[in-house]
Image: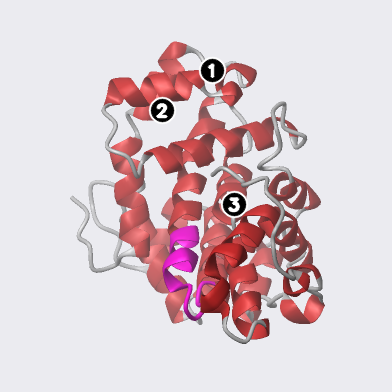
Amino acid sequence: MDVAAAAPSFDSAWATNLDAADLPVLPDVTEQVLRMASDPQSSLQDLAQVLSRDAAIAANIMRLANSPLYRGREPIVTLHQAAARLGTMKLRDVAVLVASESRLFRARGFEVEARQAFTHGLLTGLWAQELARRLRGAVEEAFLAGLLHDVGTPLLLQAACDRIVNPGSCRDQILLVVAQRHASVGADLCRRWRLPERLAITLLHHHDALPNAAGTMGETIALADDLADACEQELDEQALVARTSAHPAAARLNLYDDDIVGLVRMKDTLVATAGAVTNPARTAS
């Protein structure tokens, strides 16, 4: 997503004075899952037991486990089966996904933009993990970075709704400020949630000019972000391959032509997987 360079034309103090009170805390279950995911003594069964206490998390885990990207020959019918299929770090990611959706993506009057940030983030995370897999990189870290890369957007939209008397009257100005400042706010939220510092750095720099200041992970998110944007356009496989090959990050990541073709062919699966999670009413084929 391109960030506009023009300076905001109205008082944007509402976006610069955010403090700890403005940054939402994680739900208890999600905090416990984050601790357990980094504890080698915790088992998948232990995690599944904790996750079963949160109906929203449990439902999303089941949907993801049965989505086109993860489903096997037989459908998953229990949370313990889903935990075994997805693994510890993916369970952590789903817990963060549900926390971010429920706590952040509700900005009154900007519901469309907030929801779009969530769905775009999930699709970016799916692209990022596929990129990281081909690069033999940190797959789960890439997913989480992609998922949260625009998390500052709904947070700032909520701040605008809370602090501006009539936010609808200056909608365009608000969206401009959000585009300019969401990266730093997203990094602040990562630190508030005690997520790894390298994740905060990736979020902070995900719109930087290449070479990306966050290194390989930053390049990965930049390309995944563009691929997620491209999914909104009706590009055929050849056009998407050409677009991906031309992205500066592709060369810096040393992606070969076969890598890019294989990646692009994942598009339908990744879009269907994102849809299965964000739109439960949709039946994935």
User: Distance from label 2 to label 1 (Cα)?
Assistant: 10 Å
Up the image or down, 82 lies above or below 141; here it is below
Q: Is 192 rendered above or below residue 150?
A: below
* Highlighted magenta segment, given as a residue range: 105-118
Answer few, some or many: residues within 10 Å of disc 1's Cα (few below 14, many 20 plus, some between 14 and 19).
some
The residues bearing labels 3 and 2 have C-alpha atoms spaced at a distance of: 19 Å
Q: Which mark is residue 144?
A: 3
Which circle's residue, 3 or 2, is located before the other in the chain? 3
Asked whether the beta carbons under mark 3 and mark 2 sit within 8 Å of each other, the answer is no
* Figure colour scheme: secondary structure
Name the amino acid, label 2: Leu
Asked whether, in this view, residue 211 is left or right of residue 172, the answer is right
Q: Position of residue 253 (x, y in %)?
A: 61, 21
- Looking at marks 2 and 1 on the same chain, the residue that comes earlier in the sequence is marked by 1
Amino acid type at circle 3 is Leu
Which of the two residues, 143 or 219, is positioned nearer the viewer here? Answer: 219
